[in-house]
Amino acid sequence: MSFRCGIVGLPNVGKSTLFNALTRTALAQAANYPFCTIEPNTGEVAVPDPRLAPLAEIGKSQQIVPARMSFVDIAGLVRGASKGEGLGNQFLANIREVEAVIHVLRCFDGTDVTHVEGRVDPVADADTVNTELMLADLSSLERRAAAQRKKAQTGDKEAKAEVALMDAALALLSAGKPARLVEVPKGDEALFRGLNLLTAKPILYVANVDEASAATGNKHSEAVAKLAAAEGAGFLVISAAIEAEIAQLPDAEQREFLEPLGLAEPGLDRLIRAGYALLGLITYFTVGPKETRAWTIPRGARAPQAAGVIHTDFEKGFIRAQTIAYDDYVRLKGEQGAKDAGKARDEGKDYVVQDGDVLLFKFNV
């Protein structure tokens, strides 16, 4: 499935530096002037998962195939973007194409990197971006609402439901609150997603701090943490400068670099876990002599939908799924040991896949 996180924020807050570090590429030009990123760069990374190696060893797999996720480095936004200022129209269009938003905020002092508005105030920066996104959503909804109201008056049930969602979103946006706070009635989730509102996308605030504050944060990141809590958004502290440094090191040397800084792991690992939580994603595994592979699905997905991630034929012809919990698979040394211990279960179409399940699908095309 697609898992694209758009990296956004004001110019010169560290978006491209973080993007380059996370994707270990130099695709994005990290420069000290606004709009150094014009076309959105996309980088795909492997999802680190310590469960893969033990599974591959037990399964005697020839290779390991991790799950993948994409980051999109989007041009910096400035005040007035909702009216086309700067690269506003392009910025807004690029955000519409991602599933989640990683909002990078400058949380470091110093004059080496200029701030587009001449001050360091991450909460004010967040307000600038969020206001532009809300204004864009308001404009979009106001244009569409009139036509849908007329359609609803004809008795169209779907139009009525959509108008109700629009009105709820308009009320929040007019009050300066994001559309993600709309209480969507059960069964109307797809309708709400179809509105494609910028502020309805899940958001993770990333406080980009100086190296000395990477482990503990600082007064700026504390302010961002309070903002995230108030909005029900995700929050993470990262030093893009540190990530840029360790991106140049082999994996084995990264932890040696991080330990003196009080960091247990690279920011990429923490960012991906935060992204999973943001989108409600989980991982299941398939294990065989050819490969051990990780598959990403939404939390709550049932066995046929999980099978469909591998191939649509698996979902169409689904019969059952042999299911072994990760801990049981490792403890009992694989499929046969799990079967002997009664820990391999055959689950049907209603089974809700759990994070870490090792699955073998039976299907008929």
Image (spheres, rainbow, N blue to C red):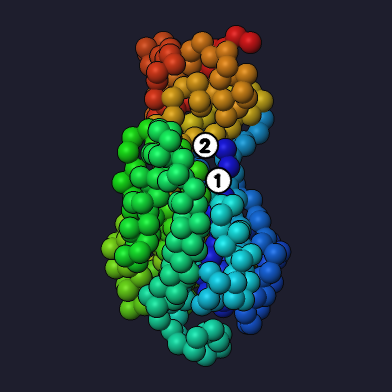
- Disc 2 versus disc 1: nearer the observer: 1
Kindly state the secondary structure of the residue where label 2 is placed. strand
Q: Quadrant of the C terminus?
A: top right
In the image: residue 24, left or right of residue 139: right
Kindly state the secondary structure of the residue where label 1 is placed. loop
Residue shown at 55% from the left, 87% from the top: 114
Q: Nearer the viewer, residue 116 or 64?
A: 116
In the image: residue 271, left or right of residue 61: left
Q: Quadrant of the N terminus?
A: top right
Distance between the alpha carbons at the discs numbered 2 and 1: 9 Å
Residue density around tag 1, few if under 14, some if 14–19, many if 20 or more, within 10 Å = some
Residue 180 in percent (x, y) is at 38, 53
Note whether residue 312 is visible: yes
Question: To which quarter of the image does residue 34 belong?
Answer: bottom right
Residue 186 in percent (x, y) is at 33, 35
Q: Nearer the viewer, residue 338 or 217?
A: 217
Mark 1 is on which residue type?
A: Phe
Tell me the number on the disc at residue 355: none
Q: Which residue is mark 2?
A: 296
Residue shown at 63% from the left, 72% from the top: 87
Q: Earlier in the sequence, mark 2 or mark 1?
A: 1
Q: Are marks 2 and 1 in contact (CB under 8 Å)?
A: yes
Tell me the number on the disc at residue 3: 1
Residue shown at 67% from the left, 75% from the top: 36
Mark 2 is on which residue type?
A: Thr
Residue shown at 59% from the left, 76% from the top: 85
Above or below, 35 against 286 in this view is below
Q: Nearer the viewer, residue 224 or 97?
A: 97
